[in-house]
Amino acid sequence: MVNQRGYTFITIIFVLFLVNLSLMVAIPVWETQIKRNLEKEAIFRGSRIVNAIGMYTRKHPGKLPKNLAQLVKEKFLRRKWRDPLSRGNWYLVMLPQVPNPDFVYLVKEEQAGQFPKPALIGVAPRATGESVLTYKGSNQYEDWLFIVRLSDKKFRKVYWKK
């Protein structure tokens, strides 16, 4: 009888190689799918926040909310959603108190209380880099702004630092 141990060992090595190869193909696909799902969730949450700001302005004509907590307190949002892309807080998109502005401030949510005369018009993700999905013609997170439509004008972004 011939010894079969060497053939069994080679078969096990070959099976492990095939499993490893299939994982090398599958993991990037899973990562892309997870990233796509997080982007879809960010777009959904950003849109819900914009809708809440719109309802606030219809209930309080001529006024804008100061922060997300005010929208939750007055029941325009069920809860304060986090930014799923950065897994943290959003940038708050604030309108400056100047006539006919062509820019908006991006304020860290933690610093919103320090911003003079806050007027919240939306949110933006804190994540940076390239996205899988395209939102309003951009595939860069830095260009994604979820804002209430005030006009057809495009705003420049200015990062507010205190």
Image (cartoon, grey):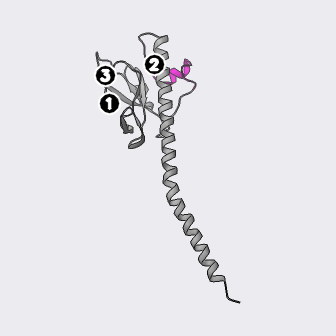
Three-letter amino acid code at the position of disc 3: Lys
Q: Position of residue 3 (x, y in %)?
A: 67, 87
| For residue 143, above or below residue 116 | below
Q: Is residue 87 visible?
A: no
Asked if residue 135 lies left or right of residue 16, the reply is: left
What's the magenta bit mostly, secondary-structure-wise?
loop
User: Which of labels 2 and 1 is toward the front?
Assistant: 1
How crowded pointer 1 is (Cα within 10 Å; few <14, some 14-19, many 20+) is rated as some
Q: Which mark is residue 50?
A: none
Q: Residues within 10 Å of mark 2 (few under 14, many from 20)?
A: many
Depth-wise, is mark 1 or mark 3 nearer the camera?
Answer: 3
76 in the magenta segment: yes
Please indicate whether residue 39 sits to the left or right of residue 100 in the image. Answer: right
Q: Secondary structure at mark 3?
A: loop
Q: Which residue is mark 2?
A: 65
**Residue 144 falls in which quadrant of the image?**
top left
Comparing labels 3 and 2, the label whose residue is closer to the camera: 3
The residue positioned 29% from the left and 17% from the top of the image is: 98
Mark 3 / mark 2, whichever is N-terminal: 2
Residue topped by disc 1 = 157
Seen from the viewer's position, the closer of residues 21 and 60 is: 21
Q: Quadrant of the N terminus?
A: bottom right
Q: Which residue is mark 3?
A: 153
- Disc 2 residue type (three-letter): Pro
Magenta stretch: residue 103 in it?
no
Q: Secondary structure at mark 2?
A: loop
Residue at coordinates 50% horizontally, 60% vertically from top-left?
24
Magenta span covers which residues? 63-78
Residue 98, above or below 85:
above
Q: Residue furthest right?
A: 1
Name the amino acid, label 1.
Lys
